Amino acid sequence: MRDHPFDEVLNLEQDYYDEGYRQGFADGKVAGQSEGRTLGLEKGFEKFRETGRLHGKSLIWANQLLLPQKNLNHSSEEVAQDCRNDSSINPTTVSSLLKPLSKSQRVTRHLIALHALVESETLSIQNTEEAVSDFDERLKRASIKSKLIESLVGNNNLKSDTNETGPVISESLYDSKMQMKIESSSP
């Protein structure tokens, strides 16, 4: 059977459709990989930022537990005055002092668990299904531990400033040279 002389013209629409599909598929594959990588980096950054925030909170709470208990009944102004009298303390850090936490076995136990969950040396940064699910599970458990500790402590001393996007850790908690501001929620 002979090809019809008008087959090329009659199949023109299908030929252009097939060519467009092949080009679109190739372009989509490249764009999909690029967009997927960008999305993965954004989500990974958000997860590690949250892990870092929780790690910082655990360190601050641990340091508050180690503070002398004599200051528990003093007002923050009395503590600040005591610190101003101490020549070893930088005056710019006086306003950043946090009240010590009462030593409680329950708070200590949860704080140790929180710190173990978000410790950077034990977190896997592999891009495997098992490592990602383990990381997500640890982050979820750490978030729950953090909320539990906040409720046990009574008030969250780390929420010194708030805005419409959520709590913010004040710059005064950090050395003035670093001038870091960590937001606990993304826009």
Image (cartoon, rainbow, N blue to C red):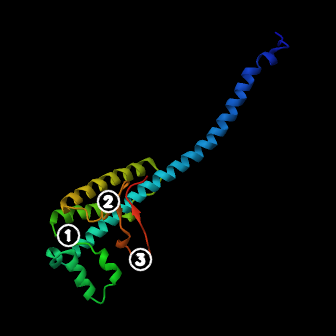
Tell me whether the residue at label 3 lies in contact with that at label 2, contact meaning CB atoms closer than 8 angstroms.
no
Q: Is residue 148 left or right of residue 120?
A: left
Mark sitting earlier along the chain (3/2): 2
Disc 3 marks a residue whose amino acid type is Ser
Q: Quadrant where the N terminus lies?
A: top right
From the viewer's side, name the closer residue of 73 and 15.
73
From the viewer's side, name the closer residue of 181 and 111.
181
Could you tell me residue 69's position as x and y percent? 16, 76
Q: What's the CA distance linking mark 1 and mark 3? A: 24 Å
Q: Secondary structure at mark 3?
A: loop
Q: Secondary structure at mark 1?
A: loop
> Circle 3 is placed at which residue position?
176
Q: What's the CA distance linking mark 2 and mark 1? A: 21 Å
Q: Is residue 21 left or right of residue 82?
A: right
How many neighbours does mark 2 have within 10 angstroms: few (below 14), some (14-19), or many (20 or more)? many
> Circle 2 is placed at which residue position?
117
Q: Secondary structure at mark 2?
A: helix
Could you tell me residue 114's position as x and y percent? 28, 61
Q: What's the CA distance linking mark 3 and mark 2? A: 29 Å
From the viewer's side, name the closer residue of 118 and 86.
86
How many neighbours does mark 1 have within 10 angstroms: few (below 14), some (14-19), or many (20 or more)? many
Disc 1 marks a residue whose amino acid type is Leu
